[in-house]
Image: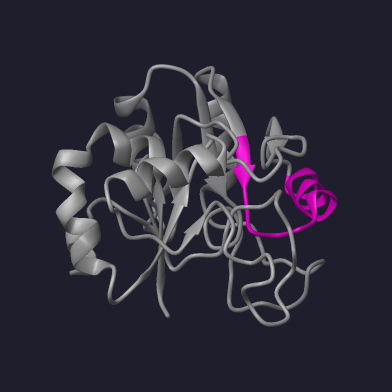
Amino acid sequence: MTSVAISFEYFKKCIDELLLKVEKISDKYDIIFLSSTKPDEVRSFLDTYDIPYDYINDNRSGDVPNGPTVSDCKPFADYYFGKFIPFDENWDEVVEEVINRIDYGTVAVDFDGTIVEFNGWNGLKNYGDVKNGAREGIKRLKREGYKVMVYTTRNSRPTVKKAMDEYGIPFDCVNGGKNHNGLKPHFDICIDDKGIESLDELS
């Protein structure tokens, strides 16, 4: 089934606006809640308010045939919502959007399809060419004082670090920089080619 990953903290803050929208799409999409809060606490909140969901933070640990059992990567999803800025091939525009939305903090950036070209999975250690404008855009974010975290589903920090160094792209960490025990690493906003601005786009 097609899936959508939703920032739990963003959802909780806007629950009055988003509850009915999540209920509306829950029959057509797997719902994954991403959270920096312990899963038991998230589950308790969701169950208390009878909010539909399928996974919390990780949709791969034993649930997807032949999928990696990991707790340290961005969960696979077809769409990401809440603190996610859609990337539509224009790095100049997306950097301006970040600057307009937040004055400082951590900017997470998706890897495949956002920083590098992605034309289908070709193995863990293989990756595409750097996308037009990505190097310059991320360098500008760093000059403006933002911390840059590469946020990726790839279960290989060394491969991602190698690519970033090879392409001369500055960054601070990959997926939070250390094992975060299955919790979403902190970021203030995320640039992602699978990001969406509204759940209405899925209705």
At 15% from the left edge and 55% from the top edge, which residue is drawn?
Answer: 20
Tell whether position 78 is magenta: no
Residue at 57%, 58% (x, y): give it.
75
Q: Quadrant of residue 23?
A: bottom left
Percent position (x, y) of residue 203? Answer: 17, 69
Q: Quadrant of the N terminus?
A: bottom left
Residue 162 point in image, percent of width and height: 83, 50
2 or 126: nearer the eye?
Answer: 2
Residue 79 at x, y = what percent? 40, 62
Q: Residue at x 75, y 58 (%)?
A: 155
What segment is highlighted magenta in the picture? 149-167
The x, y position of residue 46, in whole percent, is: 36, 47
Give left or right: position of 92 versus 57.
Answer: left
Q: Is residue 170 visible?
A: no
Q: Is residue 110 visible in this depiction of the protein?
A: yes
Q: Is residue 113 above or below residue 34?
A: below
Does residue 88 appear to the left or right of 186 in the view shown? left
